[in-house]
Image: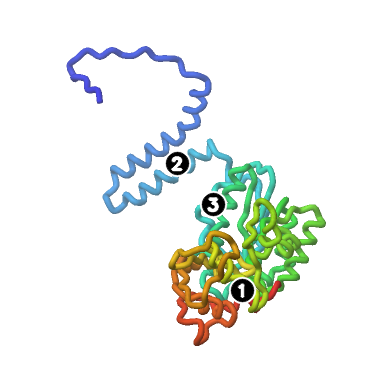
Amino acid sequence: FAQRHRNSPQRRPARLAPSASAMVFRAALRPLRRLSGRAATFAVRQPVGARSLAAGSAVAAGACAAGTLLPSRCAESPLVDVSCLTKVAKTDDIGLLPQPLNPKYKTALVQFYVPSQPFGGSDKSASGHRYDSLPIANGMIASGMSCQLLHYVPSEHDTFFKVLEGFDAIIVRCNPGQINAGGGDQMKFDDSMRALQKKGLQVWPSPDVMMNMGAKDALCKIADLEIGLPDTLAYYSKEALDEGFKKTMAFQPRVIKQNRGSSGEGIWIIKLKSGSYCSAFGERSCTDDELLDMMEANDNHSEEHTVAEFVEFCLNGRTSKSGTWTTKGVGKYLEGGKA
């Protein structure tokens, strides 16, 4: 840093005339300077115990002055009024970016909280929001659209969908099975979303898209395309699972998923503990006693089981033949069929 001796001559720099924009800025900040100065004087004169009040005064002074620069919160809100709906989230949407004052489009992100499940479902954080809800909403906001986070409550069905009519688009982030588990009716929910579509609203994904492409077996439909993999299979019977899993597992590491759901439960990343994969698909099949190194996607915990134990768990859950499992899931992945 530069230091000037106190007795050395001081050259006063030439003063430049402020620009018009600088003058406007200074005028806008004048209330802040005046009020914060008063708060600082008050803090010096008061005993230590009263300084927290002075700090609050300084903050209040800043807020008052900021009112000359920023639009008033009392101004007409660009958001859809959702005050008639129950706010389920445990926090005040902490982490959500400020909504745009003039959004290009008004969107809503719809979630579902299952009261009987911890955190409202394994796809939720302690806030009650899905882990990906804030990033999705912030992405919409960053693109110039508003995005309000809502929770569907079955007892408010009619009111909820009336409010949704005020939006331009709806992002649906309700895991399959959660609405029914929380006392609602998935078909009633889907039909109401279809009704919004008929009125011109965009619904992403629509109930029909979820029905046709929401299940994991959608990957099987593209297995023979350039973007697919020929060893992608869906299992709906014991025979298909027993034969297909052993054949594909011998070829390369697998991701085994329940047919529906996106919370990570029943989604296993599996490798052969020996690492002895065959060079071509179909060249060999695993034996029942080969060990599997497994990790579940919902909490990244690891387990080790034989091929036979895993197949038994998928078919019948915890039995004397499936070994000891630490997962919270119950297995029996084929019980849901294709639904």
Mark pair 2, 3: CA separation: 23 Å
N-terminal of the pair, mark 1 or mark 3, is 3
Q: Position of residue 338 (x, y in %)?
A: 70, 72
What quarter of the picture does the C terminus occupy?
bottom right
Mark pair 1, 2: CA separation: 70 Å
N-terminal of the pair, mark 1 or mark 2, is 2
**Residue at which label 1 appears:** 243
N-terminal of the pair, mark 2 or mark 3, is 2
Q: Amino acid at mark 2?
A: Gly
The reply to whether callout 2 and callout 3 are in contact (CB within 8 Å) is no
The vertical placement of 7 against 175, above or below, is: above
Between disc 1 and disc 2, the foreground one is 1
Label 1 sits on a secondary structure element that is helix
**Residue at which label 3 appears:** 96
Label 2 sits on a secondary structure element that is helix
The vertical placement of 113 against 54, above or below, is: below
Task: Report the coloring of the rendering.
Answer: rainbow
The residue depicted at 27 percent of the width and 49 percent of the height is 47
The residue depicted at 56 percent of the width and 70 percent of the height is 285
**Residue at which label 2 appears:** 62
The residue depicted at 62 percent of the width and 47 percent of the height is 140
How many marks can you see?
A: 3
Q: Quadrant of residue 72?
A: top right
Q: Position of residue 37 (x, y in %)?
A: 37, 37
